[in-house]
Image (cartoon, rainbow, N blue to C red):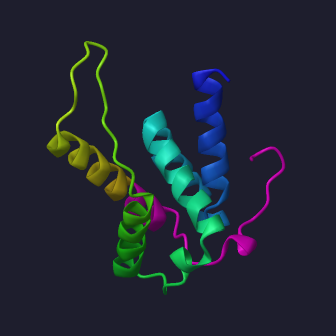
Amino acid sequence: MYPVTERNTLVEALSSMSKHARRQSARAFLEGLSTDELQYIAAYFGARTLDPNLGNQTATQSNRACEIQRYERARGRKVVHTSAQGGTRTATKLASAVSHRMMVLLEFLIVSERTALSAKSWPATAGSA
């Protein structure tokens, strides 16, 4: 898949998960994100589909933040990134990148007014899988 096509597909799919009245603002928010950030948000919703306990909290900002932290802990993989020049990213830089993605995800949940409903209640949109 071409990077632009993948990015557009992610924006379309993720914005369709927002409440109808908030889709335009959610789309505008998503269009400003990098592909990595979009993939992180999509992975979170995929995890919520597979783990019903992940989205059981009442939809407050504090509970959403706790869900995101629980998601990140559940990912629990050790990741070592190497640059094109062969260097490795320090743990501090990696933690900073993850922390940034977690904040972006929380902001998306707030912007889209996404509640902590189960995946079964998400609207199905043809072509956005």
Q: Which residues are magenta?
A: 105-129
Q: Is 82 situated left or right of 108 in this image?
A: left
Q: Residue 18: percent from the left, percent from the top?
A: 61, 62
Name the residue rendered at 50%, 39% in the picture: 31
Residue 30 drawn above or below residue 109: above
Q: Which residue occupies the foreground of this view, 2 or 24?
A: 2
Assign the magenta stretch its main secondary structure.
loop
Residue 18 drawn above or below residue 86: below
Q: Is 23 situated left or right of 29 in this image?
A: right
Q: Residue furthest right?
A: 126
Q: Is residue 16 magenta?
A: no
Q: Which residue occupies the foreground of this view, 85 or 114?
A: 85
Residue 21 drawn above or below residue 56: above
Q: Quadrant of residue 69?
A: bottom left
Q: Residue furthest top?
A: 85
Q: Examine the rendering and report whether any part of residue 101 can be seen.
A: yes
- Name the quadrant of the N terminus: top right
Q: Quadrant of residue 49?
A: bottom right
Name the residue rendered at 19%, 40% in the picture: 93
Q: Residue 35: percent from the left, percent from the top?
A: 48, 35
